[in-house]
Image (cartoon, rainbow, N blue to C red):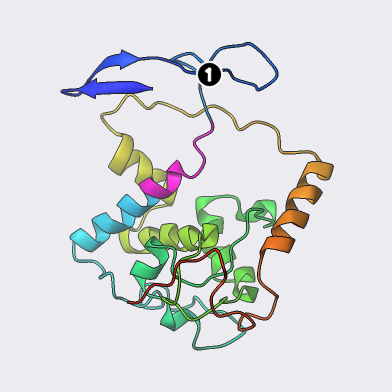
Amino acid sequence: MAVIEGGEISLAAGLGSKHPDQADSVQATTLFRIGSVTKMLTAVGLLQQVHAGQVELSTSVTTPLPDFALVGDAAWAPSIQVQDLLTHRSGLVDYLEIDAAAAYHSDDGLGDYLLGPYGLAYLMAPAGRFWNYSNPGYMVVGLVTEVLDGQGQSEYLRTRHFVGTRVQSLPPAPPPPSPLARARLLRLLHRARLDPSPWRLSRPPWSTPLTR
């Protein structure tokens, strides 16, 4: 926990323990995985492009990304607006595991993946129909920003967000979960998700219906 006043930290403290079965306390300097905090940074990047007049919130994602397509239906990708991606209303099916090959794990590989193999993804319902958390949606947000600004997402974050701050580097990620833990997680996700048919349910019970 930190309290910042006038740009200066006036209070910093750690609360709780690092592990539920251990007594090692969290300190003010304890590092945590950044997780989906990156989505806020990614959203700011695209909103900077909106502010600069490079794109509008109501713009179809296929305007900056003309090669973005979903093979299930040619009308799916053009129906997704920039604001749908930012507000988790794109309808893109969500997943946690990114099973892309190592060649795609870079700024250059982001476009290759989203404009290639990712085309096998589908919409759970028409874009804008309901809210449903989407990790892939924010991958597309990052790619739109890359295309509009002309530099990779990592470099964009470094030059537009972190220059002038105390952020120097990020700690290495912890080891991935064991195959057994991954299998259990995927089984739980499978039980919670929709039937593979994208139109079997138009409104999942965990989603809040929204209108444009």
Q: Does the magenta stretch include residue 59?
A: no
Q: What residue type is disc 1 on?
A: Gly
Specify whether 192 is left or right of 134. Answer: right
Q: Position of residue 196 (x, y in %)?
A: 70, 76
**Image location (x, y in percent) of residue 96:** 63, 53
Image point (44%, 42%), residue name: 37
Which residue carries the number 1 mark? 16
Task: Write down the region rendered in magenta.
Answer: 33-41
Say which quarter of the image contains residue 119.
bottom right
Residue 31, position in %: x, y? 51, 23
68 displayed left or right of 4 = right
Query: In the image as oriented, which residue stretches furthest toward the front?
Result: 205
Instruction: Give me the residue at 38% from left, 62% from top.
Output: 87
- How packed is label 1: few (under 14 Cα within 10 Å), some, or many (20 or more)? few
**Outermost residue, right side:** 180
Q: Is mark 1 on a helix, strand or loop?
A: loop
Q: In which quarter of the image is residue 4?
A: top left
Q: Which residue is drawn at 38% across and 22% down?
A: 1
Q: Is residue 32 above or below residue 25?
A: below
Quadrant of the image containing the C terminus: bottom left
Q: Residue furthest left?
A: 6
**Residue 168 percent coordinates (x, y):** 40, 26
Left or right, 210 with respect to 198, comes to left
